[in-house]
Amino acid sequence: MTTPYAEVIGDPIAQSKSPAIHGYWIKKLGLDAEYRKCHVTPEELEGYIASRRNDPDWRGCNITMPHKQAVMPFLDRLEIGAELVGAVNTVTRRHNGALIGTNTDVGGFLEPLANALAQKHFFRMARIIGTGGAARAVVAGLAENGFTLVLAGRNPEKAQALLDEIDPEGEHHVAPLDHFAEPTDFTFDDREGCLDLIVNASPLGMEGQPPLALDFSHVPPGSVVYDIVTHPVDTPLLQAARAAGLRTIDGLTMLIGQAAIAFERFFGQAPPRDDGDAELRQILTP
């Protein structure tokens, strides 16, 4: 009797929290299933996909860096979300062996914003730091929800190309990374009825990385500050935002949210989240 399984692949892979997340849900539901991690180098990626395609027990995989774009030519079809973002973070295997690429990062990122997005606003603006793979999902999700975006990165030309690719009709703006580091004397207008986001979609502030330099004079009153970094979970950016009285969202929220979408695709059941992920978050932040 064989056991159905899914896994996460990447290079490196040791740091991935996905096995802990999916393993927790599998145990809670009492499923006869496994979730593994598999170290796959760029040179091994095509062979890995070919080998798993013919494995009837393999339900699919989550994909982390550096394979989110490189995997796309080896798949049979991309869902609309993956096409829009231009990156795949989840592959599922259909009964006929067809491999489908999707991107659950968008749904995971948007999940904690659902209540705010359900309301009507006069104006929605997001200031986003970062131009990598995670930023692509953030840009796509917010553009689809009517945000005007200011995208900041070390290379403004790369930021502009990203915006032009994902939302060419949008009236968005780019800025150099150091733009938000320097104080501004800009006076924000009445923000009543507006939705403002500050999103760190870069590795800045992650353990071992330089800190994110953000002067809070750039942050409109009432903003939601969202940092997708997961190590540490409570970043200096989030601490400063709370001290300023602002609502914050941490990276574990997005990580768990995107994993929940993938889990249901792999195993055909929604994961147990009745406690608001409190127990799982404790496991992930010992």
Image (cartoon, rainbow, N blue to C red):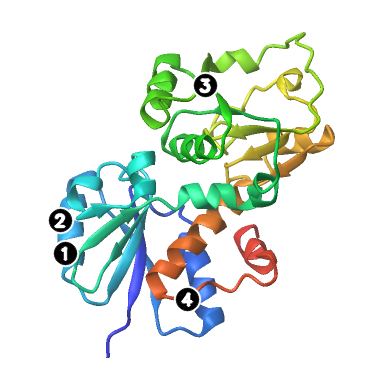
> Quadrant where the C terminus lies?
bottom right
Q: Is tag 4's residue or tag 2's residue first in the polypeptide sequence?
A: 2
Q: Is mark 3 on a helix, strand or loop?
A: loop
Residue wearing tag 2: 47
Marks 3/2: CA–CA distance:
40 Å
Marks 2/1: CA–CA distance:
6 Å
Q: Which mark, by number, is residue 51? A: 1
Looking at the image, residue 179 lies above or below residue 79: above
Q: Is tag 4's residue or tag 1's residue first in the polypeptide sequence?
A: 1
Q: Is tag 3's residue or tag 4's residue first in the polypeptide sequence?
A: 3
Question: Within 10 angstroms of label 4, few (less than 14), some, or many (20 or more) residues?
Answer: some
Residue wearing tag 3: 172
Asked which quadrant contains residue 169, the reply is top left
Residue wearing tag 4: 269
Q: Is tag 3's residue or tag 2's residue first in the polypeptide sequence?
A: 2
Q: Which of 55 and 162 is in front in this view?
A: 162
The reply to whether the C-beta atoms of the residues labelled 3 and 4 are less than 8 Å apart is: no
Marks 4/1: CA–CA distance:
26 Å
Q: Is mark 2 on a helix, strand or loop?
A: helix
Identify which amino acid the numbered label 4 is placed on: Gln
Question: Within 10 angstroms of label 1, few (less than 14), some, or many (20 or more) residues?
Answer: few
> Quadrant where the N terminus lies?
bottom left
The reply to whether the C-beta atoms of the residues labelled 2 and 1 are less than 8 Å apart is: yes
Q: What element carries label 1?
A: helix
Identify which amino acid the numbered label 2 is placed on: Gly
Give the foreground label among 1 and 3: 3
